[in-house]
Amino acid sequence: MLKKWIPAEKPDEEVLKERLDHEKEKLAVQQMKIKEHKLPVLVLVEGWAAAGKGSIVGQVIRNIDPRFFKVATMSAPTEEEKRKPFLYRHFIQIPEAGQFSFLDSGWMEEVTMARVHGEMNDREYSERVDSIKRFERQLTDNGYLLVKFFFNISHKEQDKRIDRLMADKDTAWRVSDSDKWQNKHYDKCADVFDRYLADTNTSNAPWYIIEAKDKKWAELQVLETLCSGIDVALQNNRLAVPILQNVFPLVKMPKLADVELDKTISEEDYKTELKQLQSRLGALHNRLYRKRVPVIIAYEGWDAAGKGGNIKRITGALDPRGYEVHPIASPEPHEKARHYLWRFWKRLPKTGHIAIFDRTWYGRVMVERLEGFCSENDWKRAYNEINEFEKELSEWGAVIIKFWVHIDKDTQLARFTERQNTPEKQWKITEEDWRNREKWDAYEEAVNEMLKKTSTTYAPWHILQSVDKKYARIQALKIVIEELEKALG
């Protein structure tokens, strides 16, 4: 793609100035429309070292109210970031609805640099490209405008610019060892850049190659492309997105109505097994930390099904320095203004640690679906997006354990009544709980569809029969231990 690229002809200085002034005014007007229509705009700026990426971004943002944008320079990942999934540090940079985010380098540079230095083989590269394409498609499917620029300069031009920077002691610091290496191995880098651009040039997130030899001409190319993209996005932001066919291997799940709920355990057996299982889990936690295996335990279930008590018996076996429980409530305004998975990406554990979610990303296909908090196209699309999200985590090396804590309608009523009539438990029951109960049948239908479409081989669902809470706790411990032992070998 880079090698076959034919640059546009640069206009003369007078025309260039007229077009530049026009686009600057246009962007200044568009920013208000972006805010009004709640369009999030993510601009990725990649390219050769010394190509002027930072200075052009600086020129472009002068036309935008500072309250409406953020700029992030994505340098090499820190040791802490290396203990998170590859996309973590990029996903958390996405803008709120109605705002811009400009990334000075990003996921392209991270992948291509690993490639040119021989740190990534063909299989790893292919998997990484697939992850990036899924990530970019999810953003655009969820209403983001993603504009990707590659700033191109010749080897000769890069030589000249690096020499000029190095000649001045006040700018020499701007030339890194990596920049010098890239210049020395220009042709090798060009081959890798060319392939990456071709591999990730999609209809929903195409690449725009910028002729960056002349700064004013580069600025105009960026502004015209950005403004044009904003115009199209504003026209299309109400259009529905195609629902993709599932391509992930699924595990067959029973319908909730067919799950037997008469499982029980005696008090004596419960105490004995609880002690033994918690001891085993505690030992496994030490091994997880030593081998740096991340674990994600996700809890969903009926109100009053016993999720909290179940989680308490899991955490009772763990070193408190190595886990975190995330109680998930309604999204905060800054969370609601972003991709619905953003707040979960931010809560992922680092390697060797455990994250336990009390309610999860599955709210998209349950409460958000049934309460009308998202469109039908949104929740129907979410099954595949969630499978992709969990696939990303699985390929990172995470153990994913998902529980549906199950009871029947009569048991829920009995527990609601007890909570309401017991002063120290009244905080556990709300009007919303009673309202949700009235929609039991609709929720059951939604849960059945969720279990059917998102129980994958790499992240299967486990149904915990919780009419007897003690039985459910023992089952959960056994499942967690079994899954961790499989992962640890």
Image (cartoon, rainbow, N blue to C red):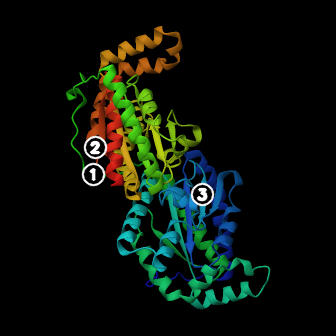
Say which element carries label 3.
strand
Tell me the residue at 29%/38% (across/down): 451
Q: Which of marks 1 and 2 is nearer the N terminus?
A: 1
Q: Do the residues labelled 1 and 2 touch (CB within 8 Å)?
A: yes
* Residue depth check, mark 1 versus mark 3: number of the one nearer the observer: 1
Identify the disc placed on residue 246: 1
Q: Earlier in the sequence, mark 3 or mark 2?
A: 3
> Along the horizontal axis of the image, is 31 left or right of 289?
right
> Where is the C terminus found, in terms of image quarters?
bottom left
Tell me the residue at 46%/48% (across/down): 286
> Along the horizontal axis of the image, is 123 left or right of 67?
left
Q: Mark 2 = which residue?
A: 453
User: Disc 1 and disc 3: Cα gap in Å?
Assistant: 31 Å
Residue 475 to residue 109: above or below: above
Tell me the residue at 25%/29% (across/down): 256
Q: Which of marks 1 and 3 is nearer the N terminus?
A: 3
**How far from the left and from the top, in percent, is residue 153?**
58, 83
User: Disc 3 and disc 2: Cα gap in Å?
Assistant: 33 Å
Say which element carries label 1.
loop
User: Disc 1 and disc 2: Cα gap in Å?
Assistant: 8 Å
**How far from the left and from the top, in percent, is residue 257?**
22, 26
> Where is the N terminus found, in terms of image quarters?
bottom left
Q: Mark 3 = which residue?
A: 101
Q: What residue type is labelled 2?
A: Lys
Residue 489 to residue 123: above or below: above
Q: Which amino acid does label 3 sit on?
A: Ser
Residue 193 seen: no
Residues 445 and 79: in front is: 79
